[in-house]
Amino acid sequence: MLRYRKEKEEIVSRFLRLYDAGMINMFEGNISMRMDDCVLITPSQMEKDQITAEDVVEIDMEGSRLNDNGRSPSSEYRMHLAIYRLRDDLKAVVHTHSPYATAYAVAGIPISVSMAETYMFFGGEIPVCSYGAPGTDDISADFRKYFIDEDKDSVLVGNHGAVSSARTLQEAFSKTEAIEKLAMIDSEVRKLGSERRFTEAEKETLLKFYRERKDR
Ligand SMILES: [Zn+2]
């Protein structure tokens, strides 16, 4: 019997949706979920559209493999574990190199477009954290500043991509989609050369939703 079959199937189905939407390709993108006794994470070096629930890897909080399915965990497992170590409330992480969000990460520009979603879902701008070589702990060197001090659940990974976390995989997935859309709109608004910024009162009303969602 496959442990955590339901959760592993959800990981695979959301992975395929990201792949079909062009948000991840064969070489990049990973999803994890934290369970009571392990972290479930997508495998490395597999064709994304070939992955099944049996291929999902179980690791502990040090990154050691717990199940023997012949697969290795995603090479970015350290980034996922860094988020889980910082925040007990977060149970799912989605990492992509979706094109518009990644363009902002490479440009070093936070996504700050004046739309309700920016404030309601992300608590204001989506910041860019510093660069670290792929697969190393350097990627998460300043995660504490954003995930704890600024209470963010999503950041752009410098010169690399985007990462979103949440209490459920569904929510982390929705944030991943939302970031890409906001980045696309932010980019178009910058091209238009004009933006009506929210007033402080308008921002405050929207930020209340963000805080209430978190307190739920
Ligand atoms: Zn990556």
Image (cartoon, helix red, strand yellow):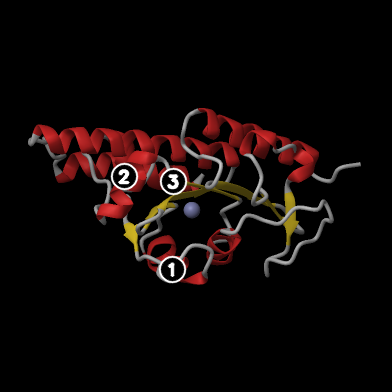
Give the amino acid at mark 2.
Answer: Leu
Q: Is mark 3 within 8 Å of ligand 1?
A: yes
Query: What label does residue 97 carry, if any?
Result: 3
Asked if one can make out residue 136 in the rendered structure from this viewpoint, the answer is yes
Secondary structure beneath dot 1 equals helix
Crowdedness near tag 1: few (<14), some (14–19) or many (≥20) residues, C-alpha within 10 Å: some
Crowding near the residue tagged with mark 2, few <14, some 14–19, many ≥20 C-alpha atoms within 10 Å? many
Task: Measure how far apart labels 1 and 3 are at the Cα level.
Answer: 22 Å
Q: What element does badge 3 sit on?
A: loop
Q: Is residue 114 left or right of residue 173?
A: left
Among the two numbered marks 1 and 3 on one chain, the one whose residue lies closer to the N terminus? 3
Tell me residue 99's x, y (percent): 37, 40
Q: Is residue 174 above or below residue 76?
A: above
In the drawing, what numbered circle is on residue 207?
A: 2
Relative depth, front residue between 96 and 35: 96
Residue at x 38% of width, y 62% of height: 146
Task: Write the residue at 84% across / 56% down.
Answer: 68
In this rendering, which labeled residue sits more in front, label 3 or label 2? 3
Q: Is residue 194 above or below residue 104?
A: above
**Of the pair 49 and 148, the residue shown nearer to us:** 49
Which residue is labeled 1 in the image? 144
